[in-house]
Amino acid sequence: MARGLRRPGRRLVVAVLAVVVAGAGLGLYWFQPWKLWQDETVDEALPAVRPASSSPPAASASASATGPAPSPSVAAGPRTLAGGELISHEHSTSGTVGLVRLADGSHVVRLENLDTSNGPDLRVWLTDAPVREGRAGWHLFDDGEYVSLGKLKGNKGSQNYVVPDDVDLSRYTSVSIWCDRFDVSFGAAELARV
């Protein structure tokens, strides 16, 4: 009889160990804690015109009625329309953000001297939310309107994020480094017009 009791006990131990190993694996995948010690630096120059992989600017209805709109002069170069300093939210974050109109009329959000923690599923969001300091600002950015400009290329450096042509820039007032997995802002900047 003692022998029969040992078997169910072993099965229980094996089942518990299997659940613990599976839970640890899932936890490691979900939280990716090693990213806290890994930095990825990306330093891009400010483009003079939209990168070739992006779609061409859409012509306005009024321009098509009177012929093609004149193209902006390439000599005009990029122009910063709005910008601000990043503040820390969930993780220590610093650097500057600029909304830049390129010579061809397209727009990019430019992060300069970015320094934040690496994390799972980080995105760059253009939002209509106000930027608040401290914990009050961590979860605001998905409450209103936002446009995801793509995955964060690196947690350090200077980078460009193409703004789609159909985005009405007058509706967005801030940029957030957003962790989509945990619905929290790592850092954000108010876009003040210049």
Image: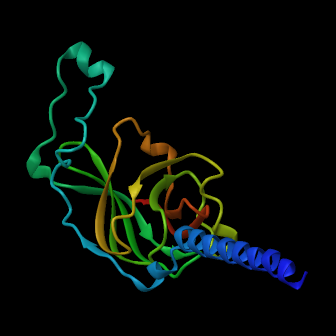
For the N terminus, the image quarter is bottom right
- Rendered location of residue 169, percent (x, y): 43, 44
Give the camera-side residue of 182 and 14: 14
Q: Residue at x 39, y 82 (%)?
A: 38
Give the camera-side residue of 135 and 24: 24
- Rendered location of residue 132, percent (x, y): 63, 68
Q: How many marks?
A: 0
Seen in the picture, residue 46 relative to 73 is either above or below; the reply is below
Q: Is residue 120 left or right of residue 53?
A: right
Q: Residue at x 44, y 39 (%)?
A: 168
Q: Is residue 150 left or right of residue 58?
A: right
Seen in the picture, residue 158 relative to 164 is either above or below; the reply is below
Give the camera-side residue of 7 and 92: 7
Seen in the picture, residue 75 relative to 84 is either above or below; the reply is above
Q: Residue at x 25, y 21 (%)?
A: 63
Q: Is residue 7 left or right of residue 154?
A: right
Give the camera-side residue of 155 and 188: 155
Q: Residue at x 65, y 59 (%)?
A: 140
- The quarter holding residue 81 reads bottom left
